[in-house]
Image (cartoon, grey):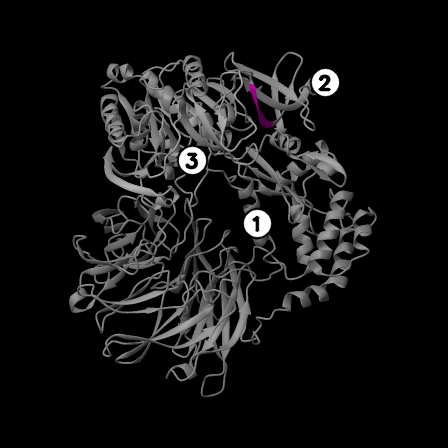
């Protein structure tokens, strides 16, 4: 058997580039073959010095980077084998305890090791690593190449020991098939835990080719990845789901374009997709097939450039492989032939030489005979010897006594020309068959109607899905395959959002019909062939595309949801002479009272909610986790801006509730907007108001809130989740924290339509989520306070980024709560997630006092000044209480709890003061609480809840309050995870009272809160903004 890696190749191509790596900033680092061999020898030397020889298994836990390849290469040339472990797994995995040693990028995974002993730190390719040796004796595997954990797509996840005799046929055959040489650039797409990764690196390093690696954030972002790969990459091995994230335009113009550098594209791991390649495409495309238990690939098929609806799995990769099609039910060796002469059954792959050892399989005994492994796939072998994938064997369900193949349904949906990708699953708890589709078409309503029409034409009634949902991206597993668990989670989120406006059974029935592809209401309009057409008033459920099976499921769902028997509903749905309008009338008359009674029967309805009135709300398309921000604009008055996970940034006029602008950013927005006035960006005499906001795409955007135009953007190198700080008295200077692994704190200076970096530094070891705060006063002037997710608190100079001091709340405990600076006392208040509240001296970072709150803290603090030397610190806690802590700086910086108020559930949002007498508290279960502080001001009594309101979802973001020009009147703005009940699901609501933020709904809401606090006895009005 040939060596996995050959020293001669490294010598021959010592000056050629072996690895090219792009980090999250698109900075390139390269390593030639000579340098790589040197680093590999260093790894091998460490193993030899620690007596790790003779076929020992060595664990590796690293993300894609040059050090990963060097460590694996060093293990190979040392005569040992490697096991790439999941970097994200927090639990020990089978196979980890087989390792004699580990190379780790972080010390956290040490808990997975069996009685580990840290031996040394080593720097490989500039990356600091920890080498760990296990104290227990482990077995040796001289013939082993590597160990890998399966994804579970063929059943329960397994740990597979792959010998050299199993992986080398892949390397040799594919190297020849793909004609790989030293001029190739191979994109290593798969994670290290997926065996195609091993094939990629061995093929490349044995040919003197260049391995192209990218950091994980770039790998998972299709637009950023495309810019990195093209032009340049010549060979790519990728799953169809990962490949399908690119649009048809990207494929046609870049990947398969006439100028494309891509020679070879190998798609494997899932069913081959429908590809649209232009005639001038020069890329050779292959369909590759295999299972980890016979690692890695077993069959290959070259795909012609003509449009193919079906592509065969191909022929065996090498002569050692034997294919069997067995009966699905009893696993007999041969399945029965069909009327066309084809054989359909469960595919097994066997070999007498390619034999992997499956950990925990006690039924295997050494044998010279072929060992067959189950693929879990249903395959058809045609009379001419071609093999076609027909789905998974376990993807056949029974619906109303009929067998339904999910794969057959997906095949019909996938054939629609506007469908890029589709997937289906069964939601077991509700026994619903759901189909998800991805499409580039912009005609959403007509597209879905055409798709339902095609399904109803080509599928039997029992094959029709219960629901069809169009989504932006299908959720993928770590290995780049469609994730069923992710589909289930996505379905729960979609349903929560879909039903967030259902105030009663009629609205619920409308939502159900909409998901079933049936236009829901008499007199409503729908798009047909791009034109609006009114539905006939006498159209029945069956006329609109319903079936008897759909009627059965809808009837059951309505009775379960409404909690009342609806005996005539099924008959009315099936009867074609009953108009759909009569169905709605029947439901409204027979289910509404019971439905409302069930919804209002809540033990947490503490007091009447008539003091809150919904004014309006705005649909931001996805859930909102950001706090709204209010600013004064000379031309208009007070405005408010808020962003959502859809990327929409909405700005409204507070006085009129009118929308000023909607700006759509490329990715999610989770942080608040920061405003500033500037003459630099405008030639007008008066300064112009601008806002800056961070985005998940790693950029800080400066925008004009009045028209939504973008003035400039700055690349922070990683997601931005905290609001930017516009430095007081230096309005041209902005400081922002990010998730960049290189520099997580950036200071930029605004210039004409652009920015200049003043400095950027790394604070602590983790990203920054809490908002940065400016330190004023005599000792804090020119400094800011920063808190990170590893528990670090630091004082940083705005002038040059110098760290004045750095401390920790609790070691490695993240800080979500934004620090507070008390300028009168030169004190900093900050709290870790574990509830450790601390006071620090702003001058030198001296810890002055601490207090332990009884639960986790994600909320920031609200402060109430009681006297010159007494403050109340109010915070929401995950113990379901609002806590008030009295702080006395002159009394040894004492922290004393004075009162607490229990609410309905955990608190994530910061409690928000309205004036000095009232507090708004939002809970994760969607409750909005108005707490009166009159009796709590002197600490003798706790705050008292005087009004409540429950939203249709969770509340996570902090509300804001706005004082109106009317006497004793203010507004609160909030986001809700569920929208307020409105007849129009895309309408907006404004409430007078508090405003909150929710994670499920996409609605930003105004609430009004009324009180009788004026001397004249008239009612005062507070407007609240809720998300």
Label 3: how many residues lie within 10 Å, few (<14), some (14-19) or many (20+)? Answer: some
Q: CA distance from mark 3 to mark 2?
A: 43 Å
Mark 3 or 2: in front is 2
| Mark 1 residue element | helix
Q: Residue 175: tell me if it is visible.
A: yes
Does 1026 appear in magenta?
Answer: no
SS majority, magenta: strand
Please provide percent x and percent y for residue 975: 48, 61
**Which of the 4 image quarters holds residue 321?**
top right
- Mark 3 highlights which residue? 222
Tag shown at residue 494: 1
Label 2, label 1: how far apart the Cα atoms are: 43 Å
Q: Quadrant of the N terminus?
A: top left
x and y percentages locating residue 370 in the rendered image: 56, 17
SS type, badge 2: loop
- First along the sequence among labels 1 and 3: 3
**What stretch of residues is rendered in magenta?**
371-376
What residue does disc 2 label?
A: 337
Secondary structure under badge 3?
helix
Q: Is residue 375 magenta?
A: yes
- Residue at 40% over, 66% down: 910
Q: Nearer the viewer, residue 720 or 586?
A: 720
């Amino acid at each position: 058997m040939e060596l996995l890696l050959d020293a001669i190749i490294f010598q021959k191509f010592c000056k050629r580039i072996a690895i090219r790596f792009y980090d999250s900033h698109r900075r390139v680092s390269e390593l030639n073959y000579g340098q790589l061999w040197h680093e590999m020898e260093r790894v091998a030397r460490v193993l030899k010095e620690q007596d790790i020889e003779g076929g020992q298994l060595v664990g590796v836990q690293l993300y894609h980077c040059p050090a990963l390849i060097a460590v694996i290469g060093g293990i190979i040339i040392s005569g040992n084998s490697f096991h790439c472990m999941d970097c994200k797994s927090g639990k020990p995995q089978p196979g980890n305890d087989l390792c004699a040693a580990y190379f780790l990028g972080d010390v956290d995974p040490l808990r997975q090791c069996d009685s580990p002993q840290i031996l040394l730190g080593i720097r490989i390719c500039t990356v600091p690593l920890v080498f760990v040796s296990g104290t227990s004796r482990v077995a040796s595997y001289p013939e082993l190449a590597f160990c890998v954990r399966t994804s579970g797509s063929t059943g329960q996840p397994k740990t597979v020991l792959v010998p050299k005799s199993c992986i080398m046929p892949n390397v040799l055959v594919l190297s020849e098939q793909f004609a790989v040489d030293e001029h190739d650039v191979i994109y290593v797409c798969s994670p290290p835990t997926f065996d195609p990764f091993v094939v990629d690196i061995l093929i490349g390093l044995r040919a003197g080719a260049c391995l192209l690696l990218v950091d994980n954030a770039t790998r998972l972002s299709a637009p950023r990845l495309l810019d990195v790969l093209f032009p340049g990459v010549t060979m790519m091995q990728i799953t169809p789901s990962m490949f399908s994230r690119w649009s048809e335009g990207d494929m046609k113009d870049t990947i398969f374009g006439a100028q494309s550098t891509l020679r070879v594209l190998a798609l494997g791991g899932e069913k081959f997709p429908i590809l649209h390649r232009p005639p001038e495409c020069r890329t050779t495309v292959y369909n590759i097939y295999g299972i980890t238990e016979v690692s890695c690939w077993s069959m290959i098929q070259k795909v012609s450039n003509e449009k193919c609806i079906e592509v065969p799995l191909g022929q065996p990769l090498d002569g050692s492989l034997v294919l069997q099609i067995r009966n699905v039910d009893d696993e007999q060796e041969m399945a029965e032939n069909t009327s066309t002469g084809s054989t359909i059954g469960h595919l097994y792959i066997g070999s007498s030489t390619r034999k992997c050892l499956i950990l925990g399989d006690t039924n295997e005994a050494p044998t010279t005979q072929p060992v067959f492994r189950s693929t879990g796939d249903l395959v058809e072998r045609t009379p001419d010897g071609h093999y076609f994938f027909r789905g998974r064997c376990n993807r056949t369900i029974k619906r109303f006594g009929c067998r339904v193949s999910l794969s057959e349904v997906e095949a019909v949906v996938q054939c629609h020309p506007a469908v890029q990708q589709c997937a289906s699953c069964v939601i077991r708890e509700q026994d619903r068959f759901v189909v998800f589709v991805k499409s580039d078409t912009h005609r959403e309503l007509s597209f879905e109607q055409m798709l339902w029409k095609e399904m109803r034409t080509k599928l039997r009634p029992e094959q029709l899905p219960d629901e069809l949902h169009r989504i932006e991206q299908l959720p993928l597993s770590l290995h780049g395959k469609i994730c069923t668990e992710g589909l289930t989670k996505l379905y729960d989120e979609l349903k929560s959002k879909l039903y967030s406006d259902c105030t009663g059974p009629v609205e619920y029935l409308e939502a159900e019909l909409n998901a079933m592809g049936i236009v829901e209401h008499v007199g409503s309009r729908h798009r047909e062939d791009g034109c609006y057409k009114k539905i006939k008033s006498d159209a029945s459920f069956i006329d609109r595309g319903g079936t008897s099976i759909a009627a059965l499921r809808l009837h059951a769902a309505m009775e379960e949801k409404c909690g009342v028997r609806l005996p005539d509903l099924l008959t009315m749905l099936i009867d074609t002479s009953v108009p759909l309008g009569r169905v709605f009338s029947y439901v409204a008359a027979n289910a509404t009272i019971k439905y409302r009674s069930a919804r209002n029967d809540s033990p947490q309805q503490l007091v009447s909610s008539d003091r809150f009135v919904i004014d309006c709300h705005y649909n931001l398309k996805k859930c909102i986790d950001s706090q709204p921000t209010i600013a004064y604009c000379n031309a208009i008055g007070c405005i408010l801006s808020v962003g959502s996970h859809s990327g929409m940034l909405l700005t409204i006029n507070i006085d009129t509730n009118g929308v000023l602008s909607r700006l759509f950013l490329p990715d999610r927005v989770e942080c608040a907007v920061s405003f500033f006035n500037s003459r630099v960006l405008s030639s007008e005499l008066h300064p112009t108001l601008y806002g800056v906001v961070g985005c998940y795409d790693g950029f800080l955007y400066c925008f004009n809130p009045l028209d939504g135009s973008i003035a400039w953007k700055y690349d922070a190198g990683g997601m931005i989740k905290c609001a930017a700080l516009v430095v007081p008295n230096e309005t041209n200077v902005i400081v922002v924290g990010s998730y960049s692994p290189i520099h997580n704190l950036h200071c930029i200076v605004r210039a004409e339509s652009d920015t200049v970096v003043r400095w950027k530094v790394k604070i602590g070891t983790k990203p920054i989520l809490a908002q940065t705060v400016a330190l004023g006063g005599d000792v804090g002037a020119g400094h800011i306070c920063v808190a990170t997710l590893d528990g670090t608190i630091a004082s940083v100079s705005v002038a040059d980024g110098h760290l004045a001091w750095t401390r920790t709340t609790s070691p490695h405990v993240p800080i979500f709560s934004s620090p507070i600076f008390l300028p009168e006392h030169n004190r900093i208040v900050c709290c870790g997630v574990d509830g450790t509240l601390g006071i620090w001296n702003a001058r030198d970072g001296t810890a002055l006092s601490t207090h332990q709150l009884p639960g986790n803290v994600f909320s920031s603090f609200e402060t109430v000044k009681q006297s010159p030397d007494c403050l109340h610190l109010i915070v929401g806690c995950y113990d379901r209480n609002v806590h008030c802590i009295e702080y006395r700086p002159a009394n040894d910086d004492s922290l004393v709890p004075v009162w607490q108020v229990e609410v309905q559930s955990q608190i994530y949002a910061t409690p928000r003061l309205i004036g000095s007498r009232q507090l708004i508290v939002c809970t994760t279960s969607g409750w909005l609480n108005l707490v009166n502080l009159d009796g709590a001001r002197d600490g003798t009594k706790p705050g008292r809840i005087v009004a409540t309101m429950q939203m249709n979802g969770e509340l996570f973001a902090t509300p804001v309050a706005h004082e109106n020009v009317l006497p004793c009147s203010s507004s609160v703005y909030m986001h809700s995870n569920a929208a307020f009940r409105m007849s129009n699901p895309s309408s907006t609501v404004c409430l007078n009272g508090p405003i909150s933020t929710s994670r499920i709904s996409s609605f930003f809401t105004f609430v009004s809160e009324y009180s009788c606090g004026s001397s004249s006895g008239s009612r005062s009005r507070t407007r609240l903004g809720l998300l």
